[in-house]
Amino acid sequence: MNAAKPERSQVAHQVMWNRMISIVEEQAQALVRTAFSTSVREAGDLSAGVYDASGRMLAQAVTGTPGHVNAMADAVGHFIRRIGRDTMEEGDVYLTNDPWEGTGHLHDITVVSPSFHEGRLIGFFACTAHVTDVGGRGFGVDANSVYEEGLYIPIMRFATRGEVDRTLLAIVRGNVREPDQLVGDLYALATCNEIGHRRLIEMMREFGLADLAGISDFILTNSRRATLERIAALPPGSAEGHMRIDGYSTPIDLRVKVTIEADRILSDWSGTSGPDPKGINVPLVYTKAYSCYALKCAIAPEIPNNAASLEPFEITAPENTIVNARHPAPVALRHVIGHMVPDTVYDALDRLLPDLVPAEGAGSLCNFQVSLRPRTDAAAPDGARRAEVLTFNSGGSGARPTLDGMNATAFPSGVMTMPVEATEQVGPVLIWRKELRPDSGGAGRQRGGLGQFMDVGAREGHEFDISAMLDRVDHPARGRRGGQSGAPTIIARDDGVPMRGKGRQFVPHGRIVRMAFPGGAGYGDPAARDRAAIARDLALGYISADYARAQHGLEDQEIAEILAGRERG
């Protein structure tokens, strides 16, 4: 009997670990159901996690983005330091949108709640959500410093012993364009932490736990060991990766040196471009989040994400580079650069571990925010109103060594594309077109994922400003191992007036903005692509007859037979 106890303990700990993962997933789903912002409800731009009493992340929800959750892994430590462990009480809720101690820009609200059991602090729940507006210039690239980008909320109490700070709410309401929406999101964030806390206490009572020390040690010890075993099995070495992207007014060079050692992997971003005058700069916490995510996806994807499984990935970047921007640099669109970090890491990793990582994809989300108002060039109809509408969209992901890239799918962020119906419901915006973009995936043995077309306008009687947040206009995704580049981004008005890939731009009454989002790049020699796969692409409309001829050498007769089969059904 004595010999069986350790085995039962291991099984019990594994059950508790699985329960904790399900708890944080319920926490995240509660946020999805109760949030006011469409970016949370429809796109899943959020994160949720549980932490031990020291602030170490034990489990994260599957729902959410790596930029949020991996940055939030560091954020809880800042909350403990700023608030002070000795001052924390049951019913407290803390929050911040500090870009350097949160998740990278002012539009993310991070909420942390201490979890008490029988009067003792045993851990924390944390969650983050992207909100539509925090005042200032609005969500966009145009600010010259973080002070212009919106309301800054330092790490502070949102609620003390269950009592919400009404003065804080009044300040928030007085500084944002959508006060009901933002305040609703704050309550949703606090509530989802409370739900996580309740489920955790239920589990602790069920298993007779006084604290999380035992399960914390089990999770972190096993995760660390499993990750180190994966790293130790890799061939040691160093390689450099590079990517050039559009930037704002001048191109940006991302450079990284990846070094595999026996017990760690290092990513050094020395040589990367300096900070930009506009809001595409990245705090180091966000660079770390996506560097770790890239390495973990490649090296140990099935090991649960927590403090110990992230620990062996060490990320450094010189200060005063665009991937380690210091206060008060503008950082609103830090994701445009940050989402390119994984593909840059993979440019280096491909040299060390061939046939493992994908080709480049669209990278950054193809987002835009529309600021609508009654037309000013003539009398506006009754009912015309102001509104802020943010929409998340995706280009194609890069082809993988054995699989095609995914169409209109966000990698690395993982957020979902917003439905047209949800977008049009929150303001007088009209989505005239939203469909896959044929021929946009780079040719290869495996084809890159397709981008998409999107045409956007306003309802009768409205004009608007569009804040574009696009990249890959001049620097499309690059293929790997002989694969071709994906198609670049295109943006222009329907009357032919060209538009910039980034920045706030006026669109007069009656005009439409036409966008073509980028495709992912191909992997391998296009001549090696399976003929059946080419025929399938042609039959589904993913590629045109011209593409099939130029990239894969199909003859007219073969093309005609495939297209005739498509017409027949």
Image (spheres, grey):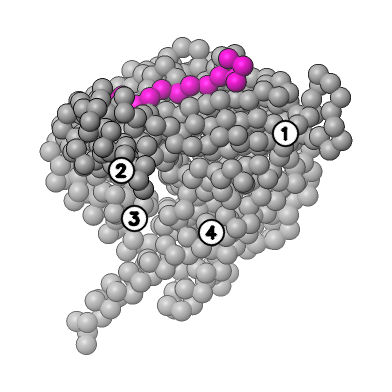
Q: How far apart are the two marked residues, 2 and 1, measured between alpha carbons?
A: 41 Å
- Find disc 4 in the rendering and name its residue: 29
x, y percentage for residue 295? 29, 40
Res 78 visible: no
- Find disc 1 in the rendering and name its residue: 459
Tag 3: amino acid: Pro
- Find disc 3 in the rendering and name its residue: 304
State whether residue 129 is above or below residue 372.
below
Tag 2: amino acid: Gly
Q: Quadrant of residue 369?
A: top right
Q: Which portion, as a residue range, is magenta? A: 483-496
- Depth check: give the residue in front, 533 or 483: 533
- Find disc 2 in the rendering and name its residue: 565
Q: Is residue 489 magenta?
A: yes
Residue drawn where x is 51% and y is 74% of the image: 202
- Depth check: give the residue in front, 528 or 353: 528
Of the two numbered discs 2 and 3 on the same chain, state the one appearing first in sequence.
3
Q: Is residue 548 magenta?
A: no
Res 235 visible: yes
Of the two numbered discs 4 and 3 on the same chain, state the one appearing first in sequence.
4
Tag 1: amino acid: Arg
Q: How far apart are the two marked residues, 4 and 2, measured between alpha carbons?
A: 44 Å
The label nearer to you, 3 versus 1, is: 1
Q: Quadrant of residue 549?
A: top left
Q: Quadrant of residue 99?
A: top right
